[in-house]
Amino acid sequence: MSNNNELKTSPDGFGRRLVEARKARGYSVEKVAEELNILKRYIQAFEEENFSALPQFIYARGFLVNYAKFVGLDGEEIARLFERSYPDNMRQKEVVSPLTPMGTVVRGRSLMRINLWLVAGVIGLVVFGFILLKIINTATSKKEEPDFTTSSQVLTPAEQAQGASIGGSGSAINIAGNNTNQVNDVAISDTGVVDIWSKGDVSIKITDKNGNVLMQGLQSRGGYQLKGNVPLTVEIDNPAQVDLSFNQKPVRLGEYTKNGRAMFSLQ
């Protein structure tokens, strides 16, 4: 700021204090304007107390507070000096907009201006969302039942003899057979057919009457069909992931589940 500009500032005014604080910090007018995103001419107008070069009072006061704080002064104190010095005839009177916002009550009238097309659009969206949500809920509520007839893999006798675990490996649950439950079904012969649908990787062990291991280990997602001499001993880890039927009759694994494991006999 030039000496000529400083002479325009009153000795005890806020402009003089701004100039001194700015120079004490080694800032130029350009630096302050750049850092605060305030026009250079406004910075000069504050320091010269040139009110006619400033924007409206409310905006000018906000700029001034930021400027004062930036150079280490008390923003509110500088703002009070600014308010006392600001000419009364330059204060902007409150401007009342002649426009009435949509949906608000017009003074002196009992009606409201409402955009009917907007209301209809909102109602349409609500109805559409309700229908879509109902369709989704209906679709997700239908439990997919495994089709053992079309999707099961029939294990060959050789695979069953090896305790086949198609796509999986692992060890069976080692629980004494004396504590197993028994599922009694009327069988035509000594051979029983077990259909299994695995919803994920599950450890399953099935042995027949003669101790032959028909399935053992970690079974991947899919369907399996086993045949063996009854009674068949079944051990399943995490039975919630398995659907099982014996001689085409579903078995409720939950009735034989304890501590996340199911163990029972089929005959």
Image: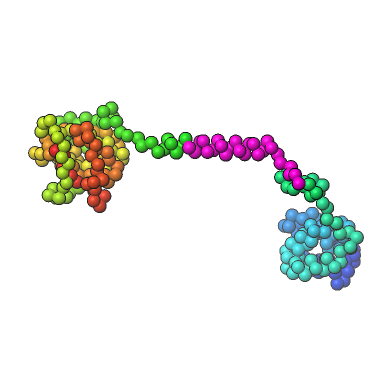
**Is 132 contained in the magenta span?**
yes
**Is 61 contained in the magenta span?**
no
Q: Quadrant of the N terminus?
A: bottom right
Scheme by which the image is coloured? rainbow
Residue at 23% of width from left, 46% of height from top? 255
Q: Main secondary structure of the magenta part?
A: helix
Q: Which image quarter: residue 185?
A: top left
Compared across the picture, whether 37 is left or right of 255 comes to right
Residue 161: tell me if it is visible.
Answer: no
Seen as rendered, the residue at the extreme left is 210
The magenta stretch spans which residues? Answer: 110-134
Seen as rendered, the residue at the extreme top is 150
Residue 249 vs residue 197, the one in the foreground: 249
Residue at 74% of width from left, 54% of height from top? 37
- In percent of width and height, residue 136 lies at 46, 37
Residue 53 vs residue 124, the one in the foreground: 124
Residue at 26% of width from left, 28% of height from top? 149
Q: Which image quarter: residue 154?
A: top left
- In percent of width and height, residue 233 lies at 15, 42
